[in-house]
Amino acid sequence: MCGIVGYIGPRQASDVLIGGLARLEYRGYDSAGIAILSSAGLDVVRRLGKLVNLSNAVSESPVPGTLGIGHTRWATHGRPSEENAHPHIDCTGRIAVVHNGIIENYLEMREELSATGHILRSETDTETIAHLVEAYYDGDLAAAVSRAIKRLDGSYALGVVHLDHPDVLVAARKDSPLIIGIGEGENVVASDIPAVLEYTREVLVLHDGEVAIVTADGVRVRTLEGADVSDPEMMHVEWDLAAAEKGGYDDFMLKEIFEQPKAIRETLRGRMCNGEIQLSELDMKPEQVAGIDRVFIIACGTSYHAGIVAKTLIEQWARIPVEVQVSSEFRYADPIVDDDTLVVAITQSGETADTLAGVREARERGAKVIAITNVVGSRVTRESDGVIYTHAGPEIGVAATKTFTAQIAALYVLALKLAQAKGTVQQERIEHLWSELSRIPDLVATILEDIDGLRECADEYIGARSSLFLGRGIGVPIAMEGALKLKEISYIHAEAYPAGEMKHGPIALITEEVPVVVVATQGHTYEKVVSNIQEVRARGAQVIAVATHGDEEIRRHAEHVLYIPATTESLSAIPATIPLQLLAYYIAKARGCNVDQPRNLAKSVTVE
Ligand code: M6R
């Protein structure tokens, strides 16, 4: 949601800003703008819609200058429009501000500023920041920014420039990510790493309450009180620009689907040693792990579906009761968690506001919180007691794919660890499950090698308006994830149900026009699932079944069968996901949808 890029150095800032914003496009936005500072003044160009509109405007009327800030806005306060697009300027037109986050007391600030003669021209909360900086400015830009942000309630990542300071960019943050790529004689401020990778892989991670004074030659970090921060956090980015590019694939989503064998393998690497599941991130003594008597999982969207998979695994293997709740409900539900509860927060981005709020709530209630995330240094990593990283590499497509299967891989490890600590699964079985788990990346690769049938199947359903996804047991969250993928990228309505529950209502929706996708892999409820298939077929439905290789019988019950290799039932969640991701992908592509940036969606949802 929203993207920030700021640049200071020898290059034309507009090129760096627009290039950097393009690398953040995946985050979702509805308008874009830049402000460039030069000896001629402060030029602001803003356009509604895609970045190409801004880029065309800048090509037609270039804005020279080597210091600037840019932004892609996902509307919160005020409709998407040119007036509401960032950067925002103060009354004098000498200060420009870009902002990610939400200023909760902006109405109060607007009233105060208007009463003292400031003219606000947009509907946004951000514009108040430009006017507050103007009000506090007395020659020291960083001090004015510090004073202004002390007045703000809410979250912000900020980039600020002032015509009086042609060689300084001021950046600050609270509850919204901001990094500074440290180059040679140039520095790039950004809300996410891909925007700086063209210039550097050395990154300064700004923390809450820190203000950075960025020049071409260096960065000084101060507290809001003006004290120097002598040891700001530095980080070397392990991946390069190629990892953040499409690499010959049509879309990031397809590339990321194909990267799953590697993502799962990397996530499992080093987790078994001499028969012991390795999970030092729990930071608990064996007897403490054995003493866990309740697990609460909080997450949103796709990560929530990974949480439901984990419930099945932990309950089955470790015999610990698990509750799974969407984060936005958890916080306000007066949840029953205490210091005997292990709370697992799953979030690929590590920045999801609802999940972060849930983490705070859980810790306030005394629970130990373990985060599962894909983003090193993300906010959830600072707010949790321990972090299990998925090693999926950068995920640019808005639809989560490889991070989902990597999350499940990490959750398999957690469930096995709990089972081993509790002694609820015999050592021989643990080792057998581990060896089966280690095969999963290869099984996924096998599925990805043979997808022609899947494309043909997808072609038949591009005209569907509504669809139903069914499964039982571990197939339920996989059906839910399949439905989410289809609806978010193809805009076909898709609903998921436990297959046995279908006859209690959703069966009324079944017609010949409603395709029914059924997770019908081998397992202890297989026969029941087949009966459910018969129920929908008797009402005219076309069935697409995800089934296990060797199951020829299923062909009699389904129009299309998408086969996956055989594995242990509880480990089938990952392979069964792959055909559903591809089905959604090919249907969406055939409908002409932008699969990487579906409408209204953002990669990390930083507002509650
Ligand atoms: O970054 P998170 O895992 O916390 O994100 C949660 C959801 O916003 C995310 O999974 C969303 O549902 C995706 N669009 C799914 O493809």
Image (tube, rainbow, N blue to C red):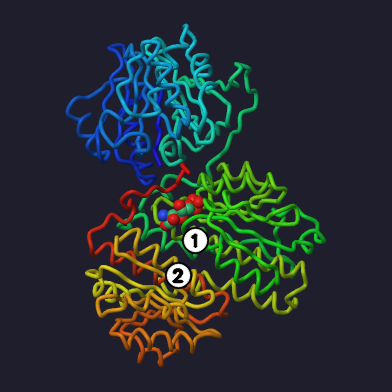
Closer-to-camera residue (250/486):
486
Disc 1 designates what residue? 404
Residue at image x 59%, y 34%? 234
Residue at image x 49%, y 65%? 261
Question: Residue 50 at x, y = what percent?
Answer: 26, 41
Residue at image x 39%, y 37%? 3
For the residue carrying disc 1, how many other residues have a C-alpha within 10 Å: few (<14), some (14-19), or many (20+)? Answer: many
247 is higher (above) or lower (below) than 590: above
Disc 2 designates what residue? 577
Numbered disc 1: secondary structure: helix
224 is higher (above) or lower (below) than 381: above
Closer-to-camera residue (370/465):
465
* 600 horizontally vs 217: left or right: left
Question: Residue 125 at x, y = what percent?
Answer: 40, 28
Residue type highlighted by circle 1: Phe
Q: Quadrant of residue 390?
A: bottom right
Question: Residue 275 at x, y = what percent?
Answer: 74, 70
Residue at image x 20%, y 34%? 56
Q: CA distance from mark 1 to mark 2?
A: 9 Å
Numbered disc 2: secondary structure: helix
Residue type highlighted by circle 2: Thr
Residue lying at the far right of the rendered structure: 287
Q: Are marks 1 and 2 in contact (CB under 8 Å)?
A: yes
Closer-to-camera residue (242/414):
414
* 411 horizontally vs 63: left or right: right
* Residue 265 in view of the camera: no
Establish whether ligand 1 lies closer than 8 Å to the Cβ of label 1. Answer: yes
Establish whether ligand 1 lies closer than 8 Å to the Cβ of label 2. Answer: no
